[in-house]
């Protein structure tokens, strides 16, 4: 009998596991995949190391800075700031036709860019920052949490173009809802991206994941890979345990699932129909172009570029076609301030992310699928080079993953990357001992997911019961 | 444990929870929150570390007793009197 079974060895599951194992619970993390990381995993191909999801870790805080989620999670998981070896971004940009706003880890840059390009909006921008909900108010109980961000912005910022530009990166990093964003989520992402900033470990996401797993196992936690949960066995309003894909039965007093709300409900054997419409709708294709030179050598020093090719930013699952390349994210992992003793990444890398439709990608037969990966990649790159130097002649290798890939390795419905639009902020389910963490609970991204795992473990599995 | 030993144990726990904070200048009759940057998650950790290390149970309604070093030691003294310091 375990005290807690955790479903999923992604960021939120591992973080939750550390909290529970630290306080002497008998914990087992069950992961269907053969490796850890979930939406933020890593892999090796053709002799190169790749990150699945990591562009940047948000919510950067410098060593000794006690505020914000990064400092919080380091304390809660009993890590040291040095354990993650975070290198700060060089700087990022929001690029719309005719106007570009740079931003970085110091808030003054974005302020001065707004004062320069949108002088009639600088007062409104300051009012916006002053009106942001505090971290303590972001548990969903504040009535302003679900307010429309577009409405808030329209009230404070006179130029609609600036509203669109400010929303673009925040939706990309990420918003599970189409078109508009809950003001609470807006505040979380505003702090994460604009007030705190971006960083990355030199060796990528594996540094974070290996730290998490090592600590978890060191505390006596059990991690089982290739151990997908097929069913949650329910009796009288409580879960008794789980049944794995191979039929193995495990008992636990509590279950904490990062598989997603709909996905978890589907496992519960007291539920016959799940509301699949409630699952997240937003997925992407992402390409990784390996170059024969460092991006700075051809004049590209941006860490992240969020681009949009019109005045209005459209944040929707593509209505027709496989992808919507009107907007995208360009990321160069080379463009971080790595320590001199770590050096530079072995290859130049450009990652491009594009909105994609899961169902249309999944419907393609193998031949069409392979052909479309190439075709859509080329369209995405073509779209991107309007906003950055053309790097196509430097490409020596590529990899592309699609919503189908995401679904295949995370088992999230629709290959959803940011979970469902309606979050289960309190992490509860219809069962009194089954709880949720991860993207469907409320926070997204690496830092968000870790905080989610910690919060839900604290609230439901550690506090008095 | 004596009150002095209990105090030492709390300092040790705080060192675990807030390793960057300077605990040498801690004033016992002033609230922790005024001297250290502790939030509700950190307070929960104090409760949980006491449970983990010494099997001391603190019900949620008593969490307010942990406001300062002085009130904490006073509250814990009867609960930890019979515990032998490791």
Image (cartoon, coloured by chain):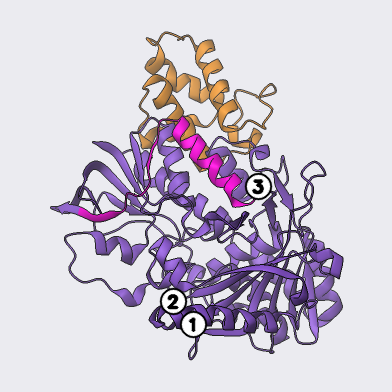
**The quarter of the displayed image where residue A217 is located:** top left
Give percent across and percent down for residue A179. Answer: 53, 82
Task: Measure the alpha-carbon separation of dots 3 and 2.
Answer: 33 Å
Give the residue at x 32% y 64%: A263
Report the disc number at residue A159: none
Q: Is residue A363 above or below residue A425?
A: below
Residue under numbered circle 2 = A281
Give percent across and percent down for residue A218. Answer: 47, 30
Give the residue at x 44% y 57%: A438
Local secondary structure at mark 1 = loop
Report the disc number at residue A317: 1
Whichever of callouts 3 and 1 sits on the residue coming sooner in the sequence is 3
Reply yes or no: does residue B77 show up in magenta. Answer: no
Give the residue at x 49% y 51%: A11
Tell whether label 1 touches label 2 (CB within 8 Å): yes
Residue under numbered circle 3 = A67
**Image quarter of the N terminus of chain B:** top left
């Amino acid at each position: 009998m375990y005290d807690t079974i955790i479903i999923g060895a992604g960021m939120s599951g591992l973080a939750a596991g550390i909290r529970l194992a630290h306080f002497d619970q008998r914990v087992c993390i069950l992961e269907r995949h053969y490796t850890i990381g979930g939406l933020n995993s890593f892999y090796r191909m053709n002799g190169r190391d790749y990150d699945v999801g990591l562009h940047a870790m948000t919510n950067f805080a410098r060593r000794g800075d006690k505020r914000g989620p990064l400092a919080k999670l380091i304390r809660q998981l009993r890590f040291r700031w040095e354990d993650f070896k975070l290198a700060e971004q060089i700087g990022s940009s929001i690029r719309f036709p005719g106007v570009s706003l740079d931003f970085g880890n110091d808030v003054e840059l974005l302020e001065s860019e707004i004062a320069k390009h949108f002088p009639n909006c600088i007062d409104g921008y300051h009012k916006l920052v002053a009106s942001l909900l505090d971290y303590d108010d972001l548990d969903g109980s504040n009535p302003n949490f679900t307010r429309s961000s577009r409405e808030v912005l329209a009230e404070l910022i006179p130029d609609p173009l600036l509203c669109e530009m400010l929303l673009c990166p925040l939706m990309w990093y990420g918003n599970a809802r189409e078109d508009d964003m809950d003001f609470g989520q807006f505040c979380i992402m505003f702090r994460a991206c604009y007030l705190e900033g971006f960083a990355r470990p030199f060796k990528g996401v594996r540094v974070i994941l290996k730290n998490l797993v090592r600590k978890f196992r060191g505390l006596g936690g059990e991690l089982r890979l290739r151990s997908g949960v097929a069913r949650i066995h329910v009796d009288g309003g409580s879960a008794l345990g789980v049944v794995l894909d191979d039929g193995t039965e495990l008992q636990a007093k509590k279950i904490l699932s990062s598989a997603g709300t709909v996905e978890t409900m589907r496992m519960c054997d007291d539920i016959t129909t799940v509301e699949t419409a409630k699952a997240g709708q937003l997925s992407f294709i992402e390409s990784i172009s390996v170059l024969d030179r460092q991006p700075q050598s051809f004049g590209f020093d941006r860490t992240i570029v969020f681009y949009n090719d019109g005045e209005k930013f459209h944040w929707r699952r593509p209505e027709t076609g496989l992808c919507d390349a009107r907007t995208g994210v360009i990321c160069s992992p080379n463009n971080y301030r790595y320590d001199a003793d770590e050096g530079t990444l072995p290859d130049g890398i450009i990652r491009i992310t594009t909105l994609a439709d899961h169902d249309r990608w999944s419907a393609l037969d193998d031949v069409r699928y392979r052909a479309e990966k190439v075709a859509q990649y080329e369209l995405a790159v073509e779209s991107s080079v309007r906003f950055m130097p053309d790097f196509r002649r430097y490409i020596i290798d590529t990899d592309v993953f699609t919503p189908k890939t995401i679904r295949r390795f995370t088992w999230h419905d629709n290959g959803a990357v940011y979970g469902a639009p309606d979050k289960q902020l309190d992490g509860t389910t219809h069962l009194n001992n089954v709880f949720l963490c991860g993207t469907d609970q409320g926070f997204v991204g690496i830092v968000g997911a870790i905080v989610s795992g910690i919060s839900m473990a604290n609230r439901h599995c550690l506090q008095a019961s | 444990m004596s009150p002095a030993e209990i105090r030492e144990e709390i300092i040790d726990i705080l060192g675990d929870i807030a390793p960057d904070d300077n605990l040498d200048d801690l004033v016992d009759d002033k609230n922790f929150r005024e001297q250290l940057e502790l939030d509700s998650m950190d307070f929960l950790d104090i409760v949980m570390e006491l449970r983990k290390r010494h099997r001391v149970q603190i019900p949620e309604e008593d969490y307010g007793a942990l406001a300062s070093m002085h009130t904490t030691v006073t509250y814990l003294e009867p609960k930890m009197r019979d515990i032998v310091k490791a």
